[in-house]
Amino acid sequence: MINNIEQLNELKNKYAPTVAMRLGHGHFVDAGDGIRKNVLICGGTGCTSSHSMDVRDALVKELKLAGIEDEIKVVTTGCFGLCALGPIMIVYPEGTFYSKVKPEDMHAIVTEHLVGGNPVRKLLYSETVKGNDILALDQTPFYAKQHRVALRNCGVIDPECINEYIARDGYQALAKVITTMTPKEVIQTILDSGLRGRGGAGFPTGKKWSFAEAQPQGKKYVVCNADEGDPGAFMDRSVLEGDPHAVLEAMAIAGYAIGADEGYIYVRAEYPIAVNRLRIAIKQAEESGVLGQNIFGTGFNFKITLRLGAGAFVCGEETALLTSIEGHRGEPRPRPPFPAVKGLFGKPTIINNVETLANIAQIILNGPEWFASMGTATSKGTKVFALGGKITNTGLVEIPMGTTLREVVEEIGGGVPGGKKFKAAQTGGPSGGCIPASLIDTPIDYDNLIAIGSMMGSGGLIVMDEDDCMVDIAKFFLEFTVDESCGKCVPCRIGTMRLLETLEKITDGHGTLEDIDKLEELSEYIKSASLCALGQTAPNPVLSTLHFFRDEYIAHVVDKTCPAHACKNLMQYKIVPELCKGCTLCSRKCPVGAISGKVKNPHVIDTSKCIKCGVCISGCKFGAIVKA
Amino acid sequence: MKKKMTTVAFTDTPEQAAQLNALIASYKDKEGNLMPVLQGAQDIYGYLPLEVMKTIAIGLDVSVSEVYGVASFYSQFTLNPKGKVSIAVCLGTACYVKGSGKLHEKCMEITGIGAGDISPDGKFSYDATRCIGACGLAPVMTVNGDVYGRITPADVEGIIRKYL
């Protein structure tokens, strides 16, 4: 039980050496417990899906067999970021990075590396092997350009151990705030830092807090929005899985700043690991006394309740989220009144996104000037992006605001795989837009992205290559929005459906030029007339692809072709006679008997029979079958 | 997503009924209790049959239509039981651009049912899910909770066969 700051510092000093070895300096740190090395294994969703927990069990078994289980500390951490290479394992102090490890590899790693001192080269991440040298993780292109603030503890500490968080200055910011600062000073610090909400719209966090603080004293709430619904985004999940206490601490700080004694975390039920780690973290924080009654003996009380969402995208909208916590259908309410005035259960409420909160303690400890020194004129600090789609290094990256899209895609992300051309990057999910290759040098910040018709959103960044049809992508997002529209207001409920139908008409090959005009007109109506941000931003994928890839729309309606050969109704499979060796493989594989020809003679596809299943193209060894 | 009521007959055990009653009692008179109770009930029964929704409505003193309204609003709540082989394909953006749309079609072809349905013999259920967060493994499908990443339509049949 921590009753005062002295006790917090005692704990910090006690556990700091345990964590110090993992901070990437390459030095051994003696924590006085006989531990020579730390082996960190990722326990995030990506790596556990590739069975990292089996790897951990095998490692523990091998350590026992080798008799060194008391010298090697095995730590299950949150996400390291490089999800595509999972399961991931790092050995400290040297920082050796093993990727795609399997349980059967553990014997070699234990005997050759942990006992023998020689890393198992064939299991290392290839980017860390340079000739005879083995680089540490932070020297690879993927990590070198990153700057970790919100993710500073992800992949470093054991998220299920509060003491490791305390060792990393955990709860120091809360202690500083409630013992030395007034609520107004706290808010001023956040205002001065320039921190803007990381959940989508980018509203200044300090301002939001000041609105709620200005309300008369009484019951108020702090709500953490952990309902990360943007398909393809997993920043918040990684913070919750890797550093849950950072969110709890920030909520308590926010509570002190606005005068609230209670907080709710609304988290997606689809994130079972994150939910479990939050439950453990809340329990540990309460038992340690950093949450609950009379925190650090100051008389400040704060408790946090976990609420599970149930998979409704609209609940990421703040008023819909509040309605959902209250136990109803997650439908948004008109604003004003804003939640800061009348929010959860009718009381003043602030709602902050997970990543926003993950920055708070660092701002308090390092000062607002430190935070404001990173980023661009209007967007301060760093931003976490979930890189996905057609990119080599799928995973999680944190970069200073103002980093260009080119640096993210080509340097950190390792470019588009398979020698394909970069076509566009999609940001902001179903509310955002596509950034074409011509704008790849745009520095990423809130205002630049809005200026080019996209938005920061929560930070999903999906890379697309030449095989992706932009009309099809717009259709994909509209299918999503139609599904997720709550149905409360007409422009969104009916308008998005009409948008989708028009897009389907175009991808089916029945579109006209008039349809393109209609798409634009209807989009403007939906934007201006919808009740909440879901509807207001729903047409963005259509408008942005229309703006940058209008020629693709025109090809669909005028030439009746899909330039990317993605729309089934607008493409055909063909055999190039010069390349076909007549091996008959395709005609035997074709499920509908559409391919005919004599042995050792070029074959032909009967397009009237072809169902475009693609079996022939993936089976042909000569690359003789093409889409046209 | 539009939800269909199930065609499977409802059965419950005395243990399940007791668990449900205890759950309702523990949340009665708490603010915002309906969703946690529905989540708990789904854990007990695996889905939310109309009979269970009626019990909850009476227990929490709200109308059945309110309970049904909430249950049908959120995609996590299922009004259909899961099949012996429960299949899902992720249709998040990262998986979609890597071809999960084709996996989706293949799964519907193999199981003969649409997304959100259960086959009449209870053998298969199929769902098209939102992002499950395993974007590094895209495209992804899950069978009875096991995750299969980086797969092609040609792999689907073999994966499902393992569970038959």
Image: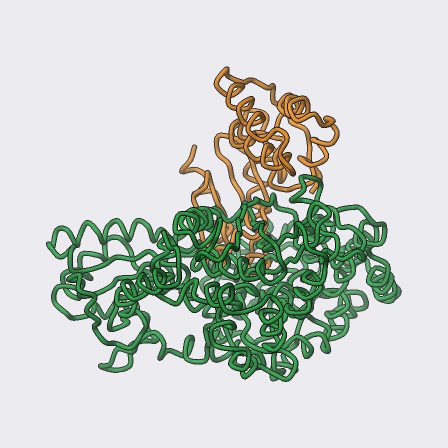
Chain colours: A green, B orange
Q: Viewer-proximal residue, A571 or A254?
A: A254
Percent position (x, y) of residue B108? 59, 41
Q: Is residue A595 visible?
A: no
For residue A219, side relative to residue A514 (left or right): left
Percent position (x, y) of residue A487? 79, 46
Q: Residue at x 56, y 31 (%)?
A: B42
Q: Residue at x 53, y 43 (%)?
A: B88
Q: Is residue B92 visible?
A: yes
**Which quarter of the picture shows residue A445?**
bottom right
**Which quarter of the picture shows residue A551?**
bottom right
For residue A124, side relative to residue A564 (left or right): left
Q: Viewer-proximal residue, A37 or A413?
A: A37
Count the labels in the image.
0
Percent position (x, y) of residue A536? 78, 61
Q: Residue at x 71, y 74 (%)?
A: A450
Q: Viewer-proximal residue, A284 or A308?
A: A284
Percent position (x, y) of residue A198? 61, 66
Position of residue A471 relative to residue A441, above or below, is above
Q: Quadrant of the C terminus of chain B?
A: top left
